[in-house]
Amino acid sequence: MTDDGLLYHYTSNEVFMNIIESDTLRLSSLDGTNDYQEGTWILDKYTDFLIKEGAELKKNTGESRRHKERILAARNNFLGFAACFSQGGEKLSQWRGYADNGKGVALCLNKEKMENFIKSINEQHKLNIRYGEIKYTESDHDKFIKQHIEKTIKKLSRSKNLTPEKEKDLINDQWASLFSHIYFHKNPAFKEEQEYRICLNVPVIELYEEIWAIRIGMKGKPFGIVPYINFQYPKIKRRAVLGGMLEKVILGSKNITPSNHLEFWLKTGGFENVTVEQSKASYR
C-alpha cells in the first residue's frame, strides 16, 4: 500500500456540502454498512475459539457455548459509530460505491493531524474514540483473540476474592474492551478497501444521558432508519476542526463542478489552504 499520509472520505455532493458547512464529520451507525458481518466477524471467531479450546482441554463445552451466547447478547448493549476512510490513493471501487458513481467528491484529510486531534479530544473530554487501520488477515485476527483471552484470564485469576458483584463488573469491563475492538477486524474479502476508521463504541444507556459529544440522531436511508452521532465543538472556533485537517478535495470524474470556483468558495469560508483537483481515475 502506498501511504501518502492522507485519509480519503468518498461521498456525494450533498453530504460534502453538509460536512463543509457544519464543519463536522458524522459518525454513523455501523449496523447499516454494506458488510452484514460488521462487528460479528471477529466475535464469531472469538467465541468459536473459546469452544474449541474448551473441547481440546476436555472442559465443559456446554459452559463455553453459554459463554458465547452471553458475549453475543452483551454486544446488543453497545452501539458502534464510525467515520470511514480509505488509504493509498484513489480507488475506483470507492468512487462507484460511496461517491455517487463518480459524480461526488473525495475529502482528503491529513492522517497525522486527524490522530492528534482525536487524542486531544479523548484527553480533554475523557472519551474513548479509537482510530486505526482495519485488520483483514487471519493471523491478525488470531493474534488479537489470543492476546485478549490471555489478558482476561490473568485479570480473573488475580481477583479470586472479589465479591460476585465486583467479579461481574470486571467481566463487563473485559467485554467492553472486547467490543471496542470488534469494528477494526473485517472479512478478508473487503481488503481492497484499505479502510481506516474513527470509531466510538457506546453503551446504549449512555446515549440517553447528558454526555458531551454524544447526541444521537436518526437518518432515513433507502433500506431503513439508522442512528448517527454528530460531535459538537462548543469551545472550538469555527473551521478549526476540518480546516486543520482537510488538505484537498478531489472531484469525481463525472463531477462537472469547476474546480477553481469550489476552491475560491472554500477559501472564503475559512479553508484557506485546501486545493481542489479533478480525479485522475479515467472512469465514466
Image (cartoon, rainbow, N blue to C red):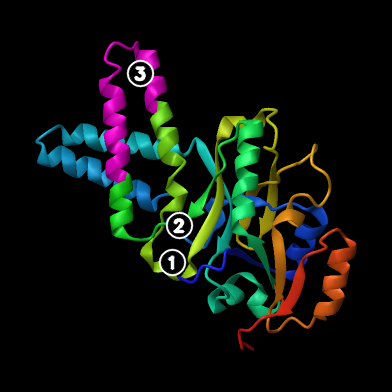
The image quadrant of residue 7 is bottom right
- Quick check: can you spot residue 224? yes
Range of residues picked out in magenta: 145-171
Task: Looking at the image, tell me whether mark 3 or mark 1 is earlier in sequence order.
Answer: 3
Q: Position of residue 163 (x, y in %)?
A: 35, 10
Task: Find disc 3 in the rendering and name its residue.
Answer: 167
Q: Tell whether 45 sits left or right of 105.
A: left
CB-based contact (under 8 Å), mark 1 and mark 2: yes
Check residue 60 for magenta coloring.
no
Q: Which mark is residue 190?
A: 1
Q: Which mark is residue 134?
A: 2
Q: Residues within 10 Å of mark 2 (few under 14, many from 20)?
A: many
Helix, strand or loop at disc 3?
helix
Q: Which mark is residue 284?
A: none
The image quadrant of residue 209 is top right
Look at the picture and state if 248 lies above or below 64. below
Q: Please name the amino acid that badge 2 sits on.
A: Ile
**Quarter of the image that includes the C terminus:** bottom right
Q: Position of residue 61 (x, y in %)?
A: 17, 36
Which secondary structure type mostly characterizes the magenta part of the structure?
helix
Q: Position of residue 67 (x, y in %)?
A: 29, 34
Q: Label 3 vs label 1: CA separation?
A: 38 Å
- Quick check: can you spot residue 207? no
Look at the picture and state if 225 lies above or below 223. above
